[in-house]
Amino acid sequence: MDLAPSPLARPFPEMPAIAGVTLRAARARYKDWERADLTYVELAEGTAVAGVFTQSLCASSEVEMGREQVQAGRARALVVNAGNANAFTGYRGREAVEAIMAQAAERIGCAPTEVFVSSTGVIGVPLPKDKARDGVAAAFAAEEVSWEDAARAIWTTDTFPKGAHASAMLGSTRVDLCGIIKGSGMIAPDMATMLGYIFTDAVVAPAFLQELLDAANAQTFSCITVDGDTSTSDTVLVFATGQSDAPAITDWNSPGADAFAAALTDICRQLAHLVVRDGEGASKFLQIRVSGATSDDSARKVGLAIANSPLVKTAIAGEDANWGRVVMAIGKAGEPADRDRLGIAFGGVWAARAGMPVEDYDEGPVAEHLKGEDIDLAVEMGLGEGHATVWTCDLTHGYISINADYRS
């Protein structure tokens, strides 16, 4: 499926090499397309890994096995298959994953459990073992590729390659973080909804890396939605190769721990925003800021209720400041709310305060704001100190067209 780049697309950034990371890609030909669809990443010995995975109860074998593998905290390789999700495929799906793990482990000389596998694409079709085997073998022999090439090789309905870079100073030494991600539809924040991979040369203890990723995920990947649907395959992995001379980070008392945590959250947020900007059929990027809720978690749930409302999303697509639809979404969220304390603003202009329309409300500036690509919606609950920010996109005819033709 060849799609025009999203109008919200961002150019791929300049990203440095990460010591201990080797990127390769090949054509396994999982679908009838002329592009690389298998990515192989080899990692330095001793690489630490952390991960978050979909909470779908119909998760793929890749996810089920990945959850087990991250417990050991070590990785030597990553294989990503694009075009086939290998989910809802029973024992055949698991056998295909185990075969890939064994093939890569034999090449590297590591335990199969140190090889992580992800797959994305059509659900319900077993991953072809022969194509996977040949694709992995081709990747072994392939030349190294760039971050952008790797980002293109992992996508399905994406319309532009997505990458991000961040850095942190640990003492007098800089460490880099580079990430690539795919995701466009079936995006709802039930952990993290996409395939995302972040690499750093920092030395980080696996347990603390997992703690940092959990915290970053809660503020970023778990605060985005495109269509309210949670994938069977969602995975975000962070690999720390330990090739930097910077001081090791083992806990919050380690020098530079705060800086590294901030950089990890930053790159996760960048990647999360890119997924929303490539939402299927999207023409608007919508930021929803909820304040005054009874708790941060309550604010997040209210924000997601607004973000997942088809009526709100279509109003944004139509550049209509229909704040009544926002009130509707807040009321159905199942969270504490008081109609007579609500305030709603578009682009910094309050349309309603204390449960009523603002008397001198001028819709002109709001209408102008809604003509843009980046839309800001603020909600004041008036109940407490809880706050959260959620990101989504509008809902257009393009979403229907893409998904009606997905398997054809």
Image: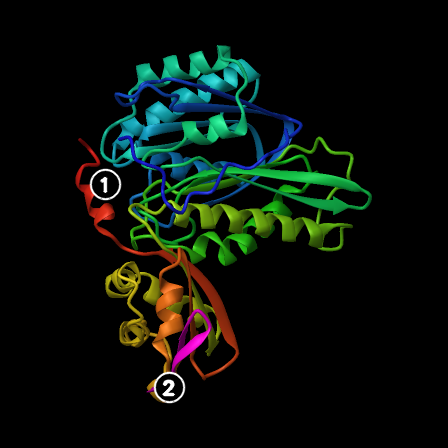
Q: How crowded is mark 1: few (under 14 residues within 10 Å), some or many (20 or more)?
A: some
| Label 1 sits on residue | 402
Nearest the viewer among 407 and 363 is 363
Up/down of 266 relative to 337, above or below:
above
**Where's the N terminus, which quadrant?**
top left
**Where's the C terminus, which quadrant?**
top left
Q: Position of residue 286 (x, y in %)?
A: 39, 59
Up/down of 88 relative to 109, above or below:
below
Whether residue 72 is visible? no
Dot 2 amino acid type: Val
Residue 151 is left or right of residue 327, and the answer is: right
Residue at image position (37%, 83%) is 361
Q: Mark 1 or mark 2, which is nearer to you?
A: 2
| Res 358 label | 2
Q: Where is residue 212 in the image (x, y as percent from the top left)?
A: 60, 51
Q: What stretch is highlighted in magenta?
A: 344-358
State the separation of the CA atoms marked 1 and 2: 40 Å
Up/down of 169 relative to 242, above or below:
below
Indicate the quadrant where residue 304 lies: bottom left
Indicate the quadrant where residue 280 lies: top left
Q: Where is residue 137 in the image (x, y as percent from the top left)?
A: 44, 12
Q: How crowded is mark 2: few (under 14 residues within 10 Å), some or many (20 or more)?
A: some
Q: What element carries label 1?
A: helix
Whether residue 101 is visible? yes
Nearest the viewer among 316 and 304 is 316
The answer to which of marks 1 and 2 sits earlier in the sequence is 2
